[in-house]
Amino acid sequence: MAEILGLGVTHSPPLARPDSGMAGILDRVRSSRRVPESFRQPDAWPEPMQCEWAANANFAAAAEHRARQVEGFRRVRKALDDFAPDFVLIFGDDQYENFREDGVPPFCVFALDEVESRPFAMGFLSSGNVWNADAETRVRTRGHAAAARYLAAKLLEAGFDTSYAYRMRHELGMPHAFINTLLFLDYDRTGLDYPVVPFHVNCYGSSVLSKRGAFGHLEQDGPVAPDPPSPSPARCFAIGAATASALAQSPWRVAMIASSSWSHAFLVEKHHYLWPDVEADRARYEELRDGQLARWRGLTTAELEASGQQELLNWVCLAGAMDHLGQRAAWSDFVETWIFNASKCFAVFPPR
């Protein structure tokens, strides 16, 4: 049986920004008309949020938040290099990048030979980054088309109506969930040349188009019509298990990565889109830490959406895989925050 390494990381764009820009999402959301006037000032926020905000007066909280994440990526990168996989599979979401009004699949496996990305050309990273990369910077990533075709076929044979694609439609190459994951795994710029199989999960479901990638709901007047839902947590758990089963029978050593932050503040309506659902994130982390990943199969789409945990579905896919293989997290870290949009989690699930 082929060995599979499980890894969990974030692809949070603010990590690529200087410390002075790490709270930029909160600054942006505070100006939205959907945020009550009474909640735009810190004295109306929860006490832990006020404390973190005060601690960031000179960006000290941002520096600490960055240090924890960078250490997490270095731990995961070491596990990745020690394992030396034949390819890396990344469960990642798409935010109005590859998939727009002309088609949104629940899942899509990308069978690529190579893809060129320009992650700093526009959007969040175009106004400065920690590596001083310019807008013309190209990042070339090798794919593993044979493994992707094999996996798509196995999932279809197992009854999962999985889409597949041979090229990216996004004008910048790989969507940020995938390219940021690779950039952060190579935060120290030593090089990263493992072939990659991007595995798209439609995490955003009912808001994938209406939010136009992130903040559309905060910039529109009036009610926002929902899109059809994401695949359920149970379905994501099941496809993760089927993916592990297929790859365990393959000739390849595989590193399987879930990439996302957890509760996103700008999605949490009950918190006026200002702070994440830290309590829900703590509960999910305790389940991960204690080897109770099977509980995630029983989560509901409504629960995840209420907590702004839509992107957790990437981790639910990994959870299904690790539960199927009987692998538990040997190391993990939960990086909690109230002002930097989303708490982050890192984990390493060694092969048995």
Image: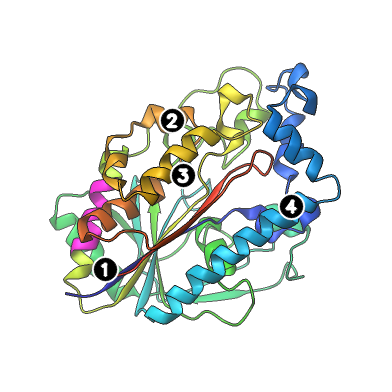
Are the residues tagged 4 and 2 within 8 Å (C-beta)? no
Residue 234 in picture, x, y percent from top left: 26, 40
Query: Observer-nearest residue: 329 or 272?
Result: 329
Residue at the disc numbered 4: 62
Q: Residue at x 64, y 76 (%)?
A: 188
Residue at the disc numbered 2: 227
Residue 273 in picture, x, y percent from top left: 63, 29
Which amino acid type is marked by label 2? Asp
Which amino acid type is marked by label 1? Arg
Q: Is mark 1 on a helix, strand or loop?
A: helix
Query: Observer-nearest residue: 153 or 352?
Result: 352
Which amino acid type is marked by label 3? Glu
Q: Which residue is drawn at 79% across and 24% down?
A: 43
Q: Residue furthest right?
A: 58
Residue at the disc numbered 1: 149
- Sequence order check: which comes first, mark 1 or mark 3? 1
Q: Which residue is drawn at 30% across and 68% down?
A: 148
Mark 1 burial class by Cα count in 10 Å: few <14, some 14-19, many 20+ = some
Q: Give the range drawn in magenta.
A: 237-245
Q: Is residue 109 visible?
A: yes
Disc 3 versus disc 4: nearer the observer? 4
Tell me, for residue 66, which label it has, or none: none
Image height check: is 174 above or below 205? below
Are the residues tagged 3 and 2 within 8 Å (C-beta)? no
Mark 2 burial class by Cα count in 10 Å: few <14, some 14-19, many 20+ = some
Tell me, for residue 311, which label it has, or none: 3
Q: Is residue 103 visible?
A: no
Mark 3 burial class by Cα count in 10 Å: few <14, some 14-19, many 20+ = many
Q: Does the magenta stretch include residue 186?
A: no
